[in-house]
Amino acid sequence: MADKRISRAPSTPMLELGLKYEPEYRGEVKQHWNVTFAHQKKISVYGKRIMARVIDQIRDNDYQLRDFYQLHISSIIEGTDIDADTAYSKIKGALYELADMKWEFESIDRKEWYFRHLLDTTKEQRVGYKDGIITILLNPQLAPYLVKAAHYSKFPLHGYMNLKSWYSMRFFEILAAWQDKGRWEVPVEEYRQYMDCWHEYDKRGQVKKGKDGEPLLKYPNTKLLIDNTMKEPEKELAGTDYEFTFTPIYETTRPTRGRKKIIRFRFDLKKGPTLKDIPESWLENSATGSIIQRLREWKVTDANIVKYAPILKQEGALELLRAWDLKNRSNRHIDDKLRYCNAAFVRAGKQALEDAKQAKLEAKKEAAEAHLIVQQALNL
């Protein structure tokens, strides 16, 4: 019998999967709104982490996707206690998932839908793993959703990478998109689609049906849906910027007898809405208004002012402005205000946040010690 195995022509080189560049991360995933709210299939947390690290490498000044993206396996398993052998199998499984993954997009009126494969496995450069380096080739047709996206959502990687549940990761992404509103309200049917608990499909994309002829659903009972998709996120997101409270919304009228049906879910962020624009009250105040004007003259962006001015307070902002004035009068003139001043402002803001967090921990510790002393005194 003839050997039908296909051999590779020796003239066709196999590009190695070793590290070709050193990955740089900004610590934030920024993607088109339609990607955040695409109907994504549930995959392993390792697959989600890989994609987060890839998208994190896309810069605001990029005009196209890279030919390929690379990352160290350590950036995917940090914060876990898995060994090297287990890590290898986890990453291999995640790459299998990503190679088969499609993102489904649907128009608002639901009259049009289409899907795109996530990875590109048609190129000579390979999707794969070698010597601790993961190589990913994104489908170039996804570029409009990842590069120069006009309507985007973003979320920080801090906290996201250590989540252990796919549902928690989806909550993290979606709640970040609604952070400026402080809440996410969604019909039960749409929620099911975002959480991959909608209709089950066969290999031909046809809806599977049960013996009663009704479409099969994952967690068909609303209580099961709530218990299996919200409990882990509620626990894992506690104490973060995306800690939430859940409220079921019932139908107001019911055509037949029986308990009213839950038709919508509402998730309120405990932290409340996050500002995106500088409030008019800040600008109208004579003290804060003048500081904002000076910060803008130094090219500090409104987004950074909104985010870090409340923690830096007037004193911190004025201290930075004085430092920049002095530096500009010296022989170390600030040539690139946009880059230099924003970096300094963000650095000072993050340090102030860390200092406030540390002070809170120390105050908590002191209160606990004082409580212990009181208890010991009472027991004497």
Image (spheres, rainbow, N blue to C red):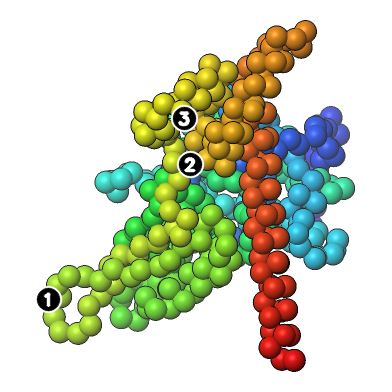
Please give the name of the residue rendered at 37% of the width and 75% of the height, measured from the top-left corner. Answer: 222
Please give the name of the residue rendered at 55% of the width and 33% of the height, measured from the top-left corner. Answer: 314
Q: Which mark is residue 288?
A: 3
Report the mark closest to the observer, 1 or 2.
2
Q: Earlier in the sequence, mark 1 or mark 3?
A: 1
Instruction: List x then y, in percent, for residue 302.
Output: 49, 28
Label 2 sits on a secondary structure element that is strand
Q: Are marks 1 and 2 in contact (CB under 8 Å)?
A: no
Please name the amino acid that badge 2 sits on: Ser
Q: Is residue 309 left or right of 19 when viewed as pictured?
A: left
Give the alpha-carbon distance from disc 3 to disc 2, as whole Å: 29 Å
Please name the amino acid that badge 3 sits on: Thr
Please name the amino acid that badge 1 sits on: Pro
Q: Which mark is residue 255?
A: 1
Q: Earlier in the sequence, mark 1 or mark 2?
A: 2
The residue labelled by disc 2 is 153
Label 3 sits on a secondary structure element that is helix
Instruction: List x then y, in percent, for residue 152.
Output: 47, 37
